[in-house]
Image (cartoon, coloured by chain):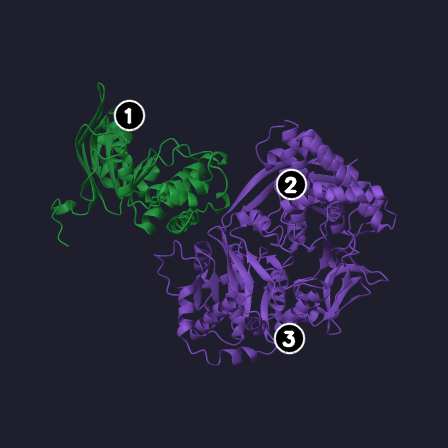
């Protein structure tokens, strides 16, 4: 493994040691086009030298915005090669969010994927006085633009090709490991997003810790589809690949992801819980549609597999019959299902960012997917702990990786100390100081428990844990996750702090409830209409009753309401990484909360809708509140 | 280069129609129509149902043979040529009713659109050897460029029969583009579409015109679209040309208002 000081220096090493091995692929014109490590390095170098001649240098910031495209990755490494930092931003951000982040980060160059993103930048250009260049990858539709700052990626590389490159390598080697490599913006569940400064040593340390516990090989293939603005993409895709020589693969477009995934069959995959849940519900929907005998076979082997794993985990003896079923099932059901979802070659699969429902988790493990939970946050470079292959269960998030220390504060908050812990929030010393205990233990903000074996369990966000009026502890996320494990529920938010009992607002899952309605021959027009059907309310009511049985008495949901629309990041109700913004919701749905505890049985609601271009509209609706059994 | 073809104002006409007429039995579908389509423009033909718009386009593309008159494309007379020969000249068209091969994939439909540009013989194509292989790769590349252009990468391997109507229309445009046309005849490309599909299609028509420099002849009923994007409009009514000019001129023309809205509106 490379022992380079910085990410671009590790790229230089790869260009020497494995120059003709594939580094990156991009599906383009329907074919996977390969770039070797030598190509990768040359692309980065040409772009870096071009940027340099435009005045980009030490400490400058370059933002990228768009889908996962090789050039956007190269641009980030190129910025780092000049001693600057990459500031990836979410491609679906609305203009005002984008303006805030780019201005706060003092971005001097933005590299965009296409016209859509260029238009977005141009609409906020007057708020970005420090901007020196807007560089685009795909020039389609941009032919008649007259903005002087607008340049093509090729033109910058052309500049770089004719620039003096003599000192390039020694300059890159001279970059210290303390230099900031990435600035990732926190999702901002409370207030404005903050720029998390991550150094080269932060990223490389975590990358090395990851490859030490996980089996990553030079011949491996990963698929790059996670938002680039999320630190996980940098940690698990870019840095892991650069450290091990594994290749990253960019799908053709988000729409073709599923097909590309299957075609490629990545050897390792990381996905958010909602992705795993949607794969499971797709499998279930397809299984429902099978003809009689096929469905019987599927169900038989599904039950057998889950039972087999249970016995294995609980140390029961496995009979010859069990083993035979497992063997047969692998050929008849498990392997074909894995293949359908591109998991044919994957030796490990990770889920993180939020808890995954135990049934979903067990299903994938039973079907031979080595699914494991990982815990991390932006401030600790995306990795804190990870489950081992043999001890993966739905409750914990595994043991801390080598070189990463975890302890629980007296308040119950999880604290982390490692070389991966960030260098501070950009231009915000106060927040930085508040984020640490004793100057070096980072306060993750999560409430957790550490068992004697060192297995970490996360309960909730520390600041969200409250108390009911009778004094019993109330962990909202704990309740919400139980609700969200239901296939029919997409999002939920619960209330109870300083209240007599727990109430919840629930957003139904439009797909599964829609399918359910189809099977019941229940006509509906849109989300609101579906959510207001008596039959659907009864369905969710039954789910809530079932879920209540798994909750401690004090936390049982007494009243709930079905929302007329799902939570949406454009409406600021959740973050781009789909975390609830509780303060905002409590404020905007104050009327609902009053109605919950005031005993009313319906409430009028005006929901704000924000379109991607920033225009606002609203929907008026009357929603009825139900008492749970 | 000195242009001596027609002299004066019509110097850059890519397509010239002169006194063309067509009748079916006793019905005179098109009566003595003349028009000039400027190179690189978006040229619309509008008119009420049965005005002869499609008949005119069918004569240009060689589907029907004109009874009289002349149609010249880049100086070549088209009347008397077979549709395949006209296609080879660089004129492609889409149809009012979708005419795709519904059992074939989107990619295969596009490759088929390139058929007139393919030169390999049957034998070398079957063997997929030498020049035939090279040619196939070239054609595939062009088809993929069009797929990328029309943003249908995710539909590449789907059969067109499975697609929604609006997408089929888009694939049909792609199939016409696969011919690398210099003149594109679009027969009601937005008919039956919802607002969003319509806006998308308008975008693609404008992009084709701007990026490939393709001259476009458009038959369309949606007046908003026609007035917005056309450089030049010709109005037909009962087989006759009743107006000819820029959108503003045509909009104000009393004959057009009469044909579209009835005479009483003019008297007010």
Relative to A552, residue A245 above or below: below
- Is label 1 in contact with label 3 (beta carbons under 8 Å)? no
Q: Name chain A's colour.
A: purple
Relative to B222, residue B114 above or below: below
Q: Which residue is mark 3?
A: A3
Q: Which comes sooner in the sequence, label 3 or label 2?
A: 3
Q: Which residue is mark 1?
A: B50
Position of residue A584 measured from the top left corner of the image (x, y, whole percent): 64, 52
Tell me how far mark 1 sits from mark 2, CA to CA.
49 Å
For the N terminus of chain A, the image quarter is: bottom right
Left or right: A378, with B182 as reference point: right
On residue A282, which mark appears?
2
Residue A563 in view of the camera: no
Q: Mark 1, chain letter?
A: B
Chain identifier, green in the render: B
Residue B49 in view of the camera: yes
């Amino acid at each position: 493994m490379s022992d380079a000081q910085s990410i671009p220096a590790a790229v230089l090493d790869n260009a020497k040691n494995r120059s003709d091995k594939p580094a990156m692929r991009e599906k383009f014109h329907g074919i996977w086009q390969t770039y070797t490590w030598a190509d990768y390095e040359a692309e980065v170098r040409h772009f870096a030298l071009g940027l340099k001649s435009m005045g980009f240098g030490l400490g400058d910031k370059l933002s990228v915005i768009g889908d996962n495209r090789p050039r956007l990755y190269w641009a980030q490494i190129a910025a780092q090669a000049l001693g600057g930092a990459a500031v990836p931003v979410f491609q679906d951000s609305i203009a005002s969010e984008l303006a805030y982040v780019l201005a706060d980060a003092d971005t001097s160059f933005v590299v965009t994927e296409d016209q859509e993103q260029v238009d977005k930048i141009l609409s906020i250009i007057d708020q970005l006085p420090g901007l020196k260049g807007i560089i685009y990858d795909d020039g389609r539709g941009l032919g008649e633009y007259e903005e002087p700052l607008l340049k093509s990626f090729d033109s910058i590389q052309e500049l770089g090709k004719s620039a003096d490159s003599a000192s390039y390598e020694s300059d890159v080697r001279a970059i210290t490991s303390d230099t900031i490599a990435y600035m990732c913006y926190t999702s901002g569940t409370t207030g404005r997003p903050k720029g998390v400064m991550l150094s080269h040593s932060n990223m490389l340390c975590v990358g090395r810790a990851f490859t030490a516990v996980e089996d990553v090989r030079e011949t491996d293939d990963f698929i790059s589809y996670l938002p680039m603005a999320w630190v996980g993409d940098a940690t698990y895709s870019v840095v892991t690949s650069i450290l091990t020589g594994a290749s990253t693969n960019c799908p053709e477009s988000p729409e073709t992801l599923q097909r590309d995934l299957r075609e490629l069959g990545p050897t390792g995959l990381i996905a958010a819980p909602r992705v795993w849940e949607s794969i499971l519900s797709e499998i279930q929907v397809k299984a429902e549609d099978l003809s009689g005998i096929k469905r019987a076979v599927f169900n038989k082997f599904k039950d057998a597999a889950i039972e087999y794993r249970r016995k294995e985990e609980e140390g029961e003896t496995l009979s010859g019959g069990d083993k035979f079923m497992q063997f047969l099932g692998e050929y008849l059901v498990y392997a074909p299902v894995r293949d359908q979802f591109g998991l044919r070659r994957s030796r490990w699969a990770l889920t993180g960012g939020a808890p995954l429902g135990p049934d979903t988790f067990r299903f994938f493990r039973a079907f031979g997917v080595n699914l494991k939970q990982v815990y991390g946050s932006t401030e600790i470079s995306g990795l804190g702990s990870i489950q081992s292959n043999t001890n993966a269960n739905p409750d914990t998030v595994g043991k801390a990786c080598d070189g990463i220390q975890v302890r629980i504060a007296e308040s119950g908050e999880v604290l982390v100390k490692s070389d991966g812990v960030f260098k501070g929030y950009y231009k915000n010393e106060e927040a930085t100081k508040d984020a640490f205990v004793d100057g070096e233990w980072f306060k993750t903000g999560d409430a957790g428990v550490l068992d004697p074996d060192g297995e970490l369990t996360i309960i909730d966000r520390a600041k969200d844990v409250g108390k009911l009026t009778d004094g019993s502890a109330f962990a909202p996320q704990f309740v919400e996750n139980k609700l969200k494990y239901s296939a029919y529920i997409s999002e939920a938010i619960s209330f109870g702090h300083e209240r007599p009992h727990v109430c919840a607002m629930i957003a139904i899952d439009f797909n599964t409830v829609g399918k359910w309605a189809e099977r019941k021959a229940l006509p509906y027009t849109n989300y609101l209409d579906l959510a207001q059907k008596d039959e659907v309310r009864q369905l969710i009511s039954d789910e809530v009753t079932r879920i209540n049985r798994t909750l401690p008495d004090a936390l049982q949901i007494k009243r709930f309401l079905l929302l007329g629309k799902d939570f949406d990041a454009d409406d600021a109700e959740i973050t781009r990484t789909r975390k609830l913004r509780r303060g905002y919701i409590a404020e905007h749905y104050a009327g609902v909360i009053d109605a919950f505890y005031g005993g009313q049985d319906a409430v009028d609601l005006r929901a704000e809708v924000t379109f991607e271009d920033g225009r606002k509209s609203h929907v008026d609706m009357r929603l009825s509140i139900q008492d749970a059994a | 280069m000195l242009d001596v073809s027609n002299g004066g104002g019509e110097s850059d006409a890519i397509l010239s129609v002169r006194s063309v007429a067509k009748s079916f039995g006793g019905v005179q579908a098109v009566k003595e129509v003349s028009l000039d389509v400027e190179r690189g423009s978006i040229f619309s033909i509008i008119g009420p149902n049965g005005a002869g718009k499609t008949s005119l386009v069918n004569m240009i593309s060689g589907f029907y043979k004109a009874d009289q008159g002349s149609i010249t494309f880049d100086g070549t007379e088209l009347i008397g040529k077979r549709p395949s020969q006209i296609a080879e000249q660089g004129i492609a068209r889409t149809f009012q009713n979708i005419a795709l091969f519904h059992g074939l994939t989107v990619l295969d439909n596009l490759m088929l659109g390139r058929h007139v540009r393919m030169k390999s013989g049957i034998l070398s194509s079957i063997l997929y050897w030498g020049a035939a292989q090279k040619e196939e790769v070239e054609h595939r590349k062009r088809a993929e460029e069009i797929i990328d252009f029309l943003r249908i990468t995710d539909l590449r391997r789907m059969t067109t029969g499975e697609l929604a109507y609006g997408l089929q229309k888009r694939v049909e445009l792609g199939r016409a583009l696969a011919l690398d046309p210099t003149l594109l005849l679009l027969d009601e490309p937005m008919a039956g579409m919802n607002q969003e599909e319509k806006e998308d299609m308008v975008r693609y028509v404008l992009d084709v015109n701007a990026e490939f420099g393709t001259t476009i002849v458009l038959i369309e009923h949606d007046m908003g679209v026609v007035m917005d994007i056309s450089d030049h409009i010709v109005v037909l009514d009962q087989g006759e040309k009743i107006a000819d000019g820029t959108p503003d001129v045509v909009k104000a023309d009393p004959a057009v208002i009469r044909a579209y809205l009835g005479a009483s509106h003019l008297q007010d």
